[in-house]
Amino acid sequence: MLAENSYGKLGIRLVKILRRQDRHELRDVTVSVALEGEFTEAHVAGDNRAVLPTDTMKNTVYSLAKEHFEADIESFGLFLSAHFLEHNPRVARARVELVEHPWERIVVDGKPHPHAFSRPGGERRVARVARTREGAAVQAGLENLTVAKSTSSSFSGFLRDRYTTLKDADDRILATAVKAFWKYAAPSGDFDRAHRGIRQTLLEAFAGHQSASVQHTLYAMGESVLEKHREVVEIRLSLPNKHHLLVDLSPFGQENRNEVFVATEEPYGLIEATVRRD
Amino acid sequence: MLAENSYGKLGIRLVKILRRQDRHELRDVTVSVALEGEFTEAHVAGDNRAVLPTDTMKNTVYSLAKEHFEADIESFGLFLSAHFLEHNPRVARARVELVEHPWERIVVDGKPHPHAFSRPGGERRVARVARTREGAAVQAGLENLTVAKSTSSSFSGFLRDRYTTLKDADDRILATAVKAFWKYAAPSGDFDRAHRGIRQTLLEAFAGHQSASVQHTLYAMGESVLEKHREVVEIRLSLPNKHHLLVDLSPFGQENRNEVFVATEEPYGLIEATVRRD
Amino acid sequence: MLAENSYGKLGIRLVKILRRQDRHELRDVTVSVALEGEFTEAHVAGDNRAVLPTDTMKNTVYSLAKEHFEADIESFGLFLSAHFLEHNPRVARARVELVEHPWERIVVDGKPHPHAFSRPGGERRVARVARTREGAAVQAGLENLTVAKSTSSSFSGFLRDRYTTLKDADDRILATAVKAFWKYAAPSGDFDRAHRGIRQTLLEAFAGHQSASVQHTLYAMGESVLEKHREVVEIRLSLPNKHHLLVDLSPFGQENRNEVFVATEEPYGLIEATVRRD
Amino acid sequence: MLAENSYGKLGIRLVKILRRQDRHELRDVTVSVALEGEFTEAHVAGDNRAVLPTDTMKNTVYSLAKEHFEADIESFGLFLSAHFLEHNPRVARARVELVEHPWERIVVDGKPHPHAFSRPGGERRVARVARTREGAAVQAGLENLTVAKSTSSSFSGFLRDRYTTLKDADDRILATAVKAFWKYAAPSGDFDRAHRGIRQTLLEAFAGHQSASVQHTLYAMGESVLEKHREVVEIRLSLPNKHHLLVDLSPFGQENRNEVFVATEEPYGLIEATVRRD
């Protein structure tokens, strides 16, 4: 009667300072660990003998971070997931998610400071590693990359039914908070460089596209990533349509030539699709 | 190259007043709609002819709410999903989620007021309907039902490794915010009554259980629902372990006999499992 | 050059279990402490000799909670503020805020359970104590008491200028999240009973009022508290107008007789006033 | 019996595109308006004849933004506050707050794009204008400028009492989310340039300071602003101490040389002070 189950620790807040000789580096991540396997007695009989406490998972993350979190979050995720599988025979699958909160160096007198940082705050970089006895799969991605374009976006010629009141828009604001996750062909490589490149490709595709809809731009972004980054086998994009409504200024004797908008939170469109290499 | 895709409207905030002769009823829901189907031209070519705007989905929800949202959220979800499938030949699957924010009547002079209400705020009732040309599936559930017990909970005898520092606890606070979703055998019935009954079963199982772990209590809760509610074929429970840490008062010459705790947000355990009828 | 200054600890999450013989009580509060006084050297010269660490404030809250948090939050706030003044000669003013997150007993077989609780989640009870060498002032209050009435509320006959497009409404939804703080004539008394009574008075005044505006209802609520509760010398009410917009269903051939509304978050009106005894 | 009162509209979300010949500019602000004056009949008698609806305030913001929001938020706030005072004889004081959500241009091929933008997300720029019949006062500021330094910060030699368990730290992480508001001597000037300069001064003072405490760094930041920016007469700084706790790795046979930390949210210190020109 016990079907799919997992347990783990979420929200493990880890900050690591890499104390280089001439400068510090600051890594700020939120780690989550989840284990799946044969845990029937724990559920049915309250027998904890096979249960590694989630508190131990947390300790493990901090302890292993000391020696093994020197490079990118993907590599640390691969290491962590291998550790949990290796030391827990009951575990069939270990999932590790790392959400990185990026910091930048404060610039003083035109130069990046060696140990003072600021955090922009919105965008997050994410790595997800899932590992079984057969091997590991790596998903990399980003969340909350908020972008907008003030022209080169339209939405017209759509299906109409008796509930349709929306008018064609041949020039509108297109705004979204990009959530993108992609799979690498192999669980290795220069993850930092790949991430930087894919992020820039997403931004350029968004900026340069003549958009007929969010779907249209989503696909162009995904296609562009697959074209320029051979290491990616598929990418999933999730684009909320953060509607900017043109304010009707005619009651006040004014014409609104696409200048004044209301930014709205709710309701919002959500367009999601996976673009996969043939 | 276009793989799985869907689009829809989220965050449609709908309040309906049912103006009965002697009293009003207040329904407060957030509706989300997502459609899946054959939308390749929209993505690849920017051809919107088959795309029903998400703005129209929103209008449809409000318009159909006028006549057809008289009873529970499950029934309205079934109606909405049928509407979208029926009027959109391209659509293979329509998903509707309704999150209800419950209101209670204000009590004046010991009597429930006919048109004044208060909203407790935490817990939400949820219905999820997924419909294809073959039929509809209904998931009902609740989120953020925050509960705690101040005794009858332990966690001991667990697996230890070199990273384990947690001590056995034979009497601890167990606190969680229950998220539960269950599937009904049939997409019909008295959904309000079923929901009320299952919710009470979950509460009683939580309160009455001698807990050896969150897993143990989770299973007891799921088992109890399956035993008492024949209409349920499976239930998925997701229980964050909202840790309450015993404060070490010994530096101040005091003994803390399970009286003073720190409530923490992060990190937190997360225990998830599905309990399914054999 | 150093003007007004204060420092303290916020977000001290304290849960206390009162282990009565036949049942437990659960107190769940977030405590904040702020101290003001002569701290110039700390700011100007980095001299910490007079600075009690905020970590110590936190420890003090937990340690004193063990013995002295037996009754209401106002009394504990009075005790805490007295402690900080007494032990810190430099401190001229100590402010303590306690936000209580109320829990209710789970009902099993029609009876309140002795040690299992649920937390509704929205409303918070608040006490604010400010103490100087001259004495203490107590403010009590509540936040996020979300209420609505589906009729007996209008807004019409208002001032119009060239930017006014709002139409008179003779029957509308009035919804708000009450924030109310009142001052007691004396810093003593049965704070629990007073709070319970004032809360009920606010609810009854809201429910029973024939409202011509939020201002009108706010004043009626304040006036009612002053009339019925002699121990209160003034009350400050802050009422956001949580707008519910009537949906225009006429494009779909429907008439909306005050039945279908959009609940909005932004923008919102905010009406604030203090009602004071003459 | 009616004492202090005000009413207004909050959360007016305004996006304006300035459509220059060769590029667009994007302004994204949340505007709040509050009016104070003689509104006794509205409260006591429900007489709305003197009440300008908050909906009209919202309309006014959008309409005036069309012609008069060309430059900085301070100037638009001054214009708005003057409008409300001029057209509402009952109003004694108009307060306008503008919170700007900054956007940056997306860089494509090394060049800033003319109409595509990204939004970092964390920091906000704020202007607060308060105007009476006597004149206007301008406060400018910023919120949520999150910064950290991984060394050059200590906290030691502090006051100890029986509740003190904190140890001296001669090298720690100092992290905060700066909230700063300053008053200009005159309600005019190049507000954009002043804001940019003061922000950079705050960053440089934070980065370059040898910190003995948050108080110490706060004062150094405020002093530096007053020294370098003659147009500022006082600055109020509010610095949460976002504690980073050193993880005890000794149970795992490791030494933690200020490398691995837990970032915590609660509890947190809060240090606030005003630094004023003599």
Image: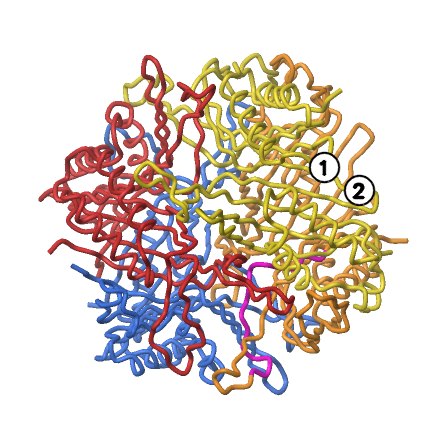
Chain colours: A orange, B yellow, C red, D blue
Tell me residue C198's x, y (percent): 25, 42
Total numbered labels placed on residues in the image: 2
Residue B187: mark: 1
Judge from the rendering whether residue A75 lies leftward or rightward of residue C65; answer left or right: right
In the image, what residue type sits under mark 1?
Pro
Residue stretch rendered in magenta on the structure: A256-271
Judge from the rendering whether residue A129 lies leftward or rightward of residue A135; answer left or right: left
Q: Name the residue carrying label 2.
A: B135
Residue depicted at x 66% and y 59%: B60
- Residue B216: name its quadrant: top right
Q: Earlier in the sequence, mark 2 or mark 1?
A: 2
Residue A266 vertical placement versus A11 (above, below): below
Judge from the rendering whether residue A270 lies leftward or rightward of residue C103; answer left or right: right
- Residue C85: name its quadrant: top left
Please, which chain is the residue tagged with disc 2 on? B
Is B237 in the magenta? Answer: no
Label 2 and label 1: CA atoms lie apart by 9 Å
Judge from the rendering whether residue A172 lies leftward or rightward of residue C75; answer left or right: right
